[in-house]
């Protein structure tokens, strides 16, 4: 999000929070991509802000409520405000509980247990989500349009297209039932929290028609390497680098 939009989004989120009786004197940018992540102080609330029409905030709220009801270890919506999407000055804003990150990483056993609990809830979830092939098709559209992705050199463009197509073919060759998928374990999509086994929900939970259970849920210590084998590569936008899916985090 450009600097001018960041300033407007921060004002929109903080003014909405004040209207909801959440005291705000300072706004800290936690992450800036297509969705702006803000920490509002001193109320210590986590606000996700994006341009109206360029977000899936309503889906995020629905997914968080559904997975939370299934006892999934995910970050929760803020309990002091109504769980819905708020709009102001062209921005959609949702309010979440803020969790401090810590530098100590979780043990492999705890991390694998968090993945196991998450997948148990995802397998039971009935939330309607976009199929992962739709995300791949959107990414392919960007890669084949040089005006949309002018910074990519031909070699990189070819590599990304081959990766997307190979990933789609590998996923669609599976024969199991579908379930929700989550993002791979990379620094921008997971955190370690003081609270046990927390997972932050991101923009989209893609659904695969043919994956019954993510292999990482059964690998124990190998779960620390992420679960790239069950997540379609290239799901992130080539323009923004924004990883979309259910972002992982777990506590020490």
Image: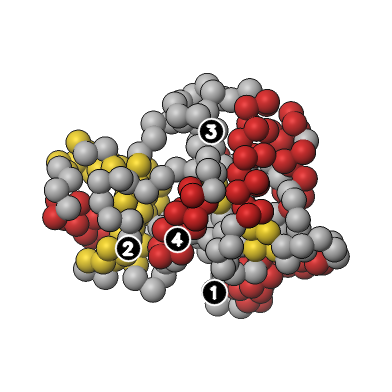
Image position, residue 62 (x, y; %): 45, 60
Please name the residue that numbered disc 3 is placed on. Answer: 197
Going from N to C along the chain, the mark reached first, 1 or 4, is 4
Please name the residue that numbered disc 1 is placed on. Answer: 148
Q: Is residue 249 visible?
A: yes
Could you give the CA–CA distance between mark 3 and mark 2, rounded to whole angstroms? 26 Å
Quadrant of the rendering where the N terminus is positioned = bottom left
Which residue is rendered at x = 63% and y = 76% of the image? 141
Q: Is residue 10 visible?
A: no
Quadrant of the rendering where the C terminus is positioned = top right
Disc 3, disc 1: CB below 8 Å?
Answer: no
Could you give the CA–CA distance between mark 1 and mark 4, rounded to whole angstroms? 31 Å
Secondary structure type for disc 2: loop
How many residues crowd mark 4 within 10 Å: few (<14), some (14–19), many (20+)?
Answer: some
Image position, residue 12 (x, y; %): 21, 59
How many residues crowd mark 3 within 10 Å: few (<14), some (14–19), many (20+)?
Answer: many
On screen, residue 183 versus residue 103, left or right, reads right
Q: Is residue 46 above or below residue 251?
A: below
Could you give the CA–CA distance between mark 3 and mark 4, rounded to whole angstroms? 20 Å
Which residue is rendered at x = 71% and y = 45% of the image? 227
Going from N to C along the chain, the mark reached first, 3 or 1, is 1
Secondary structure type for disc 3: loop
On screen, residue 166 versus residue 241, left or right, reads right
Residue 91 sits in quarter: bottom left
Which residue is rendered at x = 80% and y = 67% of the image? 172
Residue 155 sits in quarter: bottom right
Which residue is rendered at x = 48% and y = 48% of the image? 68
Image position, residue 233 (x, y; %): 70, 57
How many residues crowd mark 1 within 10 Å: few (<14), some (14–19), many (20+)?
Answer: few
Front residue (pair 83, 88): 83
Could you give the CA–CA distance between mark 1 and mark 2, rounded to whole angstroms? 30 Å
Please name the residue that numbered disc 4 is placed on. Answer: 62
């Amino acid at each position: 999000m450009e600097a001018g939009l960041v300033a407007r989004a921060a004002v929109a989120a903080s003014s909405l929070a004040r209207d909801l009786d959440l005291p705000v004197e300072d706004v800290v940018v936690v992450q800036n991509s297509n969705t702006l992540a803000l920490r509002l102080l001193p109320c210590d609330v986590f606000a996700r802000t994006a341009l109206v029409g360029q977000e899936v905030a309503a889906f995020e709220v629905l997914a968080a409520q559904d997975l939370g009801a299934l006892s999934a270890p995910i970050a929760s919506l803020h309990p002091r405000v109504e769980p819905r999407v708020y709009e102001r000055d062209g921005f959609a804003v949702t309010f979440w509980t803020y969790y401090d990150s810590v530098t100590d990483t979780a043990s492999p056993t705890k991390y694998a247990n968090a993945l196991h609990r998450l997948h148990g809830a995802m397998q039971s979830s009935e939330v309607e989500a976009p199929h992962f092939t739709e995300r791949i098709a959107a990414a392919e559209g960007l890669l084949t349009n040089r005006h949309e992705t002018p910074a990519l050199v031909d070699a990189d463009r070819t590599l990304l297209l081959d990766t997307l197509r190979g990933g789609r073919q590998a996923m669609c060759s599976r024969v199991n039932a579908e379930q929700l998928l989550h993002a791979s374990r990379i620094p921008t999509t997971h955190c370690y929290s003081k609270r046990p086994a927390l997972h932050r929900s991101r923009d989209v939970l893609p659904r695969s028609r043919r994956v019954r259970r993510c292999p990482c849920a059964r690998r124990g210590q190998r779960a620390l390497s992420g679960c790239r084998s069950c997540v379609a590569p290239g799901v992130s936008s080539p323009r923004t680098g924004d990883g979309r899916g259910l972002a992982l985090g777990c506590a020490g």
